[in-house]
Amino acid sequence: MAVYFHNKSSLSFVLGYLLLRNRENGSRNALKPMDSEQLREHGHRMVDFIADYYKTIEDFPVLSQVQPGYLHKLLPDSAPDHPESLEQVLDDVKAKILPGVTHWQNPSFFAYYPSNSSVAGFLGEMLSAGLGIVGFSWITSPAATELEMIVLDWLAKLLNLPEQFMSKGNGGGVIQGSASEAVLVVLIAARDKVLRSIGKKSLEKLVVYSSDQTHSALQKACQIAGIHPENCRVLQADSSSNYALRPELLQEAVSQDLEAGLIPFFLCANVGTTSSAAVDPLAGLGKIAKSNEMWFHVDAAYAGSACICPEFRQYIDGVETADSFNMNAHKWFLTNFDCSLLWVKDQYALTEALSTNPEFLKNKASQANLVVDYKDWQIPLGRRFRSLKLWMVLRLYGSENLKSYIRNHIKLAKDFEQLVSQDPNFEIITPRIFSLVCFRLVPEENHEKKCNNRNRKLLDAVNSSGKLFISHTALSGKFVLRCAVGAPLTEEKHVKEAWKVIQEEASFLLSK
């Protein structure tokens, strides 16, 4: 249909109207990624969704029962061209994502070591995400740097760490993403410190020491730092010392390396090993490290949290001889992942090794050395406002409640240990110290190979039930089951139910 205009002004009016309407339609359809009212609406919906998840978390199989590649069959091959509703997305989370989740916060999760969540930790994480800062240097968000210094000093006091680890001197604390990052940065700092004094060409002579119970993160750190594989001394620990590293074994290895013209420079000790929660004798090891001018790092990723309790503080006696100390608040301190705490006595060893100062990062405060720039204490440049969640955990719960929380888990583990000990079909492999119990079905006629196979089958049967999730390790050639109590929702009834399932599956295996 033809449309005729009487004059140019009529045409201009219509064209203007159409253009205005198109603009209005466009503005209605334009992407507004941070609209405060949409955030309010969707944020409330998301909190409800997560709260409902925790309310029904025990209805899910603890260990995901899906097969590899399951999700590729359920989701489209490409991203949508046009927006979908939040309800559509959450429906897919329920139907497609949650079946593929292993539920770490389930009260019947007893595998590995815990990864704690809490309301306080969640709120801190939410606030951190909401503020959206990237706090690599002081000027990028002064509160992020200063709060981190303060809360790590708070926790250092709770752990009764030496004053050299506090921020008021040459030392201080920093939040890393994981214990793997923590050991890497101190290894690099130690490497560069020694090479500055003896020359960079001596890298091939540097030697690292640890027990065979030390986390594989140290091996990866050595690979990254260029330490020659043949210079990594992995010293054997056994049941005679409850899998702790014996100082005399370390001394022997160091003496042999010195005679060979090598340079001992780094020792990693453990407080709560990954396999069995063994505790190395820090004082004895530290004495050897000090006499040989080695960097002494203490990895207390799991058990460090327990050491805020006066009765467990003894397990880090000797930490005064260490150069660095690490614990994961995200393991057993109700602080959502990731939040790994690292303290050093000499912050300058870190900054000398890790600092960069390009023009675009220069500012008056940093240039005048008035502030800490945490970018120089870590591998990446960028960093989140992680101290908020630790600050909230400490403030909303208080240290006394946190101590009670840890003590309760240790009591529940002690109860589980007693249940195992009372069953003649099972044995405890190594004495429990914290909240980890290492146990297995006993061998028949001392046949270790058959015993290992039977325990492997028991592990598979228990985990396939979906009722609980435990993991395993190997100690002196034995296939050992691990029950680590530490999920925030775990109660006595969950521990008893777990043992009931284990006994039932064991009885079925033994009856074959």
Image: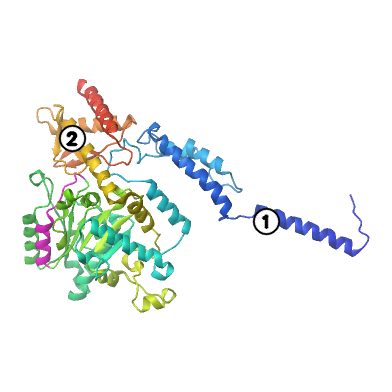
Q: Tell me if 459 is positioned left or right of 136 in this view.
A: left
Report how far apart the C-alphas of labels 1 and 2 lie in the structure. 64 Å
Magenta stretch encompasses residue 338: no
Three-letter code for the amino acid on which mark 1 is drawn: Ser
Under circle 2, the secondary element is helix
SS at mark 1?
helix
User: Is 455 situated left or right of 468 in this image?
Assistant: left
The first of marks 1 and 2 along the sequence is 1
Return the residue nearer the eye: 63 or 233.
63
| Residue range (magenta) | 275-292
Give coordinates of residue 208: x percent, y percent.
Answer: 17, 61
Q: Residue furthest top?
A: 511
The residue under label 2 is 417
Is any atom of residue 223 visible in this view?
no
Q: Is 377 situated left or right of 248 in this image? A: right
Neighbours of disc 2 within 10 Å: few (<14), some (14-19), many (20+): many
- Residue 504 pos. (x, y %): 25, 24
Tell me which amino acid carries mark 2.
Answer: Glu
Please identify the quarter of the rendering in which residue 150 is found: bottom left
457, 176: nearer the viewer: 176
| Rendered location of residue 277, percent (x, y) | 19, 46
Residue matched to label 1: 27
Where residue 13 is drawn, which disc sits there? none
- Taking the view exactly as shown, the residue that stands out farthest to the right is 6
Quadrant showing the C terminus: top left
What residue appears at the point 22 percent right and 47 percent down from the top-left corner?
274
